[in-house]
Image (spheres, grey):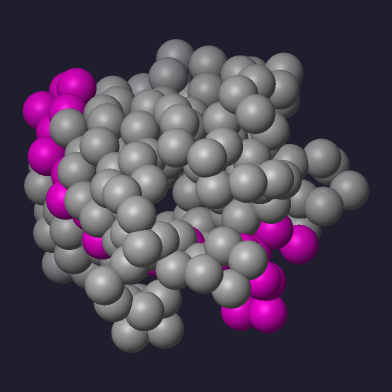
Amino acid sequence: MTRQFLAATMMITVTGFGIVPAKVALAASVPAETADTVAPSADSADQIVFRITQANLGPGYTWGNGVLHFKNTDYAISVAGGGAPAIGYSNACVQGSITGLANVEDFDSTFWAVNTEASAGSGTGSMALQNHRGTELHLNVKSHGVRLSAAAERLRFHVLGPAQKSFDSQRCS
């Protein structure tokens, strides 16, 4: 993990609930020279889409599944983990780009995230994740529910095998 990522995690954890601009959270895991250009690109060859449910009362739990599109092949994935502090319940569709992934086996690991969310009904946000192998996920989140979060999260991704549904059919609307 980079120092900037850890610093942003500590800042969010120490301050608790607060409004943290998406660029601050995203800048935590990307070099400063690319902090303004981290939005997921539809043209990126390696992409991910997944749907998750999050339930929190202080600490909480996240679970879901989706599709990893890596080197023109679609793989089914599952995600589970948790984080704190947050309160509420939400469902989200998460989609974005992947950088630094050398092979599909390296994706099967734990990613650390700095996540901010404030939704009542529906909302949007951004999330940046990084694993110990240097793989980064730059994600856009569309959530529905009632949830307030300024959390450091740990999400475990598992590659389940070839996907039954295509990446394109699972995209967030």
Q: Is residue 173 left or right of residue 31?
A: left
**Of residues 72 and 91, the one drawn nearer to the viewer in this rendering:** 72
Q: Residue at x 68, y 79 (%)?
A: 43
Q: Quadrant of residue 130?
A: top right
Residue 40 visible, this orientation? no
Q: Is residue 109 above or below residue 121?
A: above
Left or right: residue 120 versus residue 36 is: left
Q: Position of residue 166 (x, y in %)?
A: 36, 79
Residue 4 in the magenta stretch? The answer is no
- Residue 150 lies, in percent from the top left, at 37, 34
Magenta residues?
Answer: 37-60
* Percent position of residue 149, x then y: 30, 38
Q: Is residue 44 magenta?
A: yes
94 in relation to 15, above or below: below
Considering depth in this image, is 150 or 95 the residue closer to the camera?
95
Q: Residue furthest right?
A: 33
Q: In the image, what residue occupies the spot 63% across and 66% down?
A: 71
Vertical arrangement, residue 36 with respect to residue 12, above or below: below
Q: Quadrant of residue 151?
A: top left
Please tell me which residue is depicted at 17% across the width and 23% down the height of the picture.
58
Along the line of sight, which residue is nearer the eye, 44 or 152?
A: 44
Determine the residue positioned at 61% across, 55% down.
Answer: 98
Q: Nearer the viewer, residue 34 or 43?
A: 43
In the rendered view, tell whether residue 76 sits above or below residue 167.
above
Q: Report the side of 29 relative to 59 (left or right).
A: right
